[in-house]
Amino acid sequence: MNCFYSLGPLALLVSYLLPVILVFTMFRILLVLVHFKRVKEDKKLYNCFVQGLRMDCMVSSYFCVIPLLLVLILPSPFHLHVTLMLKFYFCATFAFALFMEIATFPFIEEYDLRPDSVFIEYLKHPREVMKTVWAESKVVLLLQGPCMILVFITLWKAFGYLFDNYQPWKWWIPICGFPLFAGILIMGIRSSIGHRPANISSFSFSNNHLVNELTLNSTYTLFYAIYRRFKHEKNPSRIYGGMSNFDEMRSFFLGNGFHNIYDEPTFENPAFRGVWGVSDEDLLLKAHEIFLSHGNQPFVSILLSTSNHSPFEFPEGRIELYEQPAKTRHNAMKYADYALGEFFKVAKKSSYYKNTIFLVVADHDTRVRGDQLVPLDRFRIPGLIIGPDVPVCKYEKVASQLDLLPTILHFSGVDTIHPMISRNLMEPDDGYPGHAFMQYGLHNAYRVGNDVIIRLPESEPRQFSCENNKLVPKKLDEEMAKDSLAHCLLPWILYSKKLYKVPESLQQTEPTRLSAGNGEHIYS
């Protein structure tokens, strides 16, 4: 043992590094076992552990930068003065890594991804998040806090013992060894002998999305998400992300021409109130009352229902349960359908019905998950248009949510010039197979007919053919790859350069207004 302590600063770093790497590896094994049915067919599954160890060494190397600099640069007499700081650093970073791995289990269950930017966004809304996590993962939540405290105390004692027996090197050893140790650390951080350091795409070797996710560790994915947010959000006045989560919806809609926001506090005596707000029937009843109040004035209104969200709360006695227990996804779906049906019953008897176009559309599937790089079948959502002069038909080609607004404008009879890149689905068939855009974590997919281009961060595009909702690799079409890149870059270019408006030369002298001051957003 004395021989080990004679390693000086290396004894501290080795005693810290090995447990960190062990935690990452142990949880990777557990995650593979939990999801073994989904990953067992991958012929490169072994690479999940080989490349995973490389990933863990890279993250651990980042962790070692501060302690290595302190123990190598500071003269030996000062080492005792930084002991407390180093003990806290070792314990805190280890506990953080452990916390992230434990949090990965429920996060993958919900999002099929390791913790990413969504994890960060949800930290802004502790009320909704904590109630949802408590409803779905009580055991994890109850164990995580005590586990973190126990781990921290245990590590504090263990590292205290190490520091008590710490044997500093003679003054000349750190000076002579610094280039070697720094070089090893830099190689660990780069994790590559190429001209570019390893990045998240370096660990994407499989067409099975989940295998690639399990190869990473959650400390890396979280900090990578923070890095991307910092890199792409340098303008403090930007409101682009306002629609992504709860409270930001207000600033988004008010900043984009809506005049009235009806949220939970505006609902008086709702029939039911849950984690995410009032029930769908309360939402739709209030919407009906607001629509009536407009009289003959035109209006545009957007409603967001919330009953079909975990933990799937809705009022009792409304539907015959599809399954037991009551709070399940399928029962919530049935209730949402019931509430929508009740709304249309009263709407059809109202004066606004015959002059109103209704669009019922989902924002996403219940839980977007799958083994492919982008699970195409989980991006299929319902879209229903009801209104005067809307024919009864089913659109069979590829389409996306972006195509719905031009189609609505078509049925409204409004002749407009607009900057939207989408298309009116009622245009005469010109042989174009239709296109759609999909974002799955960091994976971007551009689909035209049955051809799909998928882009991963800092990686070359890959092309596939969609056959029975399965992605079959094929030769890359360079022109289609350029189109996919253009669509990836276009939103930010339009936003940053304010090119999202119709050029003045094309604007009408008296532009058509779709709303007479009655644009509104209603959500619970």
Image (cartoon, helix red, strand yellow):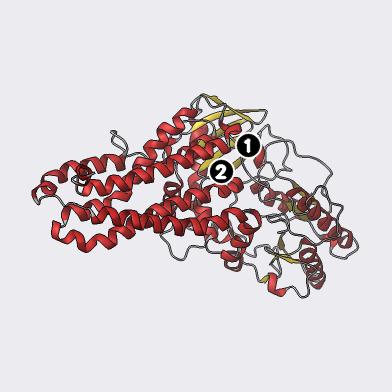
Q: Which residue is mark 2?
A: 440
Residue at 9% over, 52% down: 171
Q: Is residue 447 above or below residue 359?
A: above
Q: Residue furthest right?
A: 349
Residue at 46% over, 33% down: 48
Relative to 490, 511 lies left or right: right
The local secondary structure at tag 2 comes to strand
**Which quadrant is home to the C terminus?**
bottom right
Q: Which residue is mark 1?
A: 376
Amino acid at pointer 2? Tyr
Relative to 299, 507 lies left or right: left
Please name whichever residue, 415 or 288, is drawn nearer the observer in this view of the structure: 288
Q: Residue furthest front?
A: 1
Amino acid at pointer 1? Leu
**Real-space Cα distance between discs 2 and 1?**
10 Å
Please name whichever residue, 28 or 454, is drawn nearer the observer in this view of the structure: 28
Q: Earlier in the sequence, mark 2 or mark 1?
A: 1
Residue 284 picture location, percent across and down: 79, 63
Residue at 20% over, 45% down: 2
Residue 277 picture location, percent across and down: 70, 66
Please name whichever residue, 132 or 303, is drawn nearer the observer in this view of the structure: 132
